[in-house]
Amino acid sequence: MTVTDLPAVNAALNTVATLFLVLGWRFIRRGDLTRHRACMLGALAASALFLGSYVVYHYHAGSRPFTGTGAVRVVYLAILVSHVVLAAAIVPLVIVTVARAFRRDDERHRAIARWTLPLWLYVSVTGVVVYLMLYQR
């Protein structure tokens, strides 16, 4: 594997995080705390691996320009800007959400998780969309 393979790895890690997040949400809705925890820790691990891989890739390869024009460029930029802003915001939200879960501060955990989950899902999904728009054209 070379550094040029990392964008595909990153997209795969975002996909895995998305699947864990959705499953974790479903498990907690059913009252299965054990499986919920396992899935959310899986999502956290996949996202942490993504972040490390993302930094390594961009350190070595820099950024890749989007070559599309017209309406697709506007769509890409809208997705990219919202993704980047929310990706920066999601890191502290995840840390606080996980810390509250580990402290068993369940009420405050639920209160912030209602915001963290949809934003984390959005960031994970749009990460894959950005990858597809940049590398699979």
Image: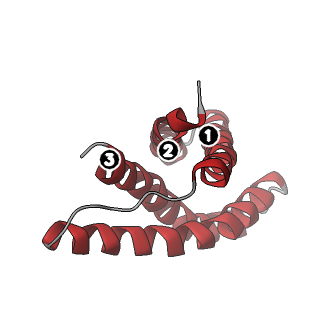
Q: Nearer the viewer, mark 3 or mark 2?
A: 3
Residue 130's tag is none
Work out whether mark 3 precedes mark 2 in sequence or the reverse, and give the earlier one: 2
Circle 3 Cα neighbour tier, 10 Å, few/some/many (<14 / 14–19 / ≥20): some
Question: What residue is shown at x 18% (from left), y 68% (from top)?
Answer: 69
> Which quadrant is the N terminus positioned in?
top right
Q: Which residue is mark 1?
A: 46
Pinpoint residue 40: horizontal percent, then vertical percent: 62, 44
Disc 2 residue type (three-letter): Asn
In three-dimensional space, the C-alpha distance between marks 3 and 2, rounded to whole angstroms, equals 12 Å
Residue marked by disc 2: 14
Work out which residue is located at the far right of the displayed protein and give it.
103
The residue closer to the viewer here, 104 or 116, is: 116
- Residue 132 is labelled as 3
Q: Residue at x 53, y 67 (%)?
A: 114
Are the residues flagged by discs 2 and 1 in contact, CB closer than 8 Å? yes
Residue 36, given in percent of the width and then of the height, sits at 60, 40
Residue 93 appears in the figure: yes
